[in-house]
Image (cartoon, rainbow, N blue to C red):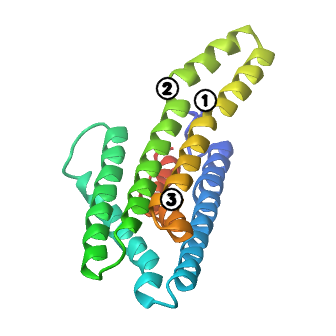
Amino acid sequence: MGIPEDDPRNPAVIADNVGDCVGDTAGMGADIYESYIGALLSSIILAMATYGNSLTYATLPLMLAVFGLAGSVLGLLSSLVIKTNPAAMLRNATYVAIVMLLITSYYYLRFFDIEQTLYVSIFLGCVAGVVIGLITEHYTGGKPVEMIAQSSQSGAATNLIEGLAVGMESTVAPVVILSGIVLIANVYGGGLFGISLAAVAMLSTVGITMTVDAYGPIAD
């Protein structure tokens, strides 16, 4: 019919964009925010159970969420100043948000005389979020993708086998990292409450995550 692939007159294009918005933005948003709220609630409950209904400790997870939100906004604004390729801009925005979260949470703990061992868990959670993001970026845009593409030249069967192998391999490093963080946070970072704080810190930059995810349907 002579209609370009991305022409809005093509009904398939409209359906594709709707699917991207529903699956990539709404679906992931519901999933990741559910995890975030679950981490916050569990942290508050563990804080009150561990420190005897202390509001100082009970509000700490909420303050981490506030610091993470402020850091996400600052990180996104920094992308207007640091002009590089889009992938690097979004990566730098995440780094800015993490650094701001670490700085503000450190001084918050000191100002309210909160156990400094909890900062170990916060730091580990932030580092885990960055490292797991880099691992995901590698397995979805690096050499593993090229290997899957090359295996497709032999047929559909090798494509499925290679895809399953790479997918299973990609889960190993995040599982090892999370297991190590749980162990270290439990021993050196405040026990169960420290583990929950690490989860909150890891999810604190959810604003940038959802912004990047919404960028796909918009750009498409």
Mark 2 or mark 3: name the one nearer the start of the chain.
2
> What residue is rendered at 24% in x and 72% in y?
107
> What residue is rendered at 57% in x and 73% in y?
37
Label 3 vs label 1, nearer the camera: 3
In the image, residue 78 above or below residue 84: below
Q: Say which element carries label 2.
A: loop
Residue 45 at x, y = what percent? 58, 81
Residue 161 at x, y = what percent? 76, 21
Tag 2 near tag 3, CB within 8 Å? no
> What residue is rendered at 61% in x and 65% in y?
35
Query: Label 2: which residue?
Result: 142
Query: Label 3: which residue?
Result: 187
> In the image, what residue type sits under mark 1?
Gly
Mark 3 or mark 1: name the one nearer the start of the chain.
1
Specify whether 114 is left or right of 128.
left
> How many other residues sit within 10 Å of disc 3, few (<14), some (14-19) or many (≥20)?
some
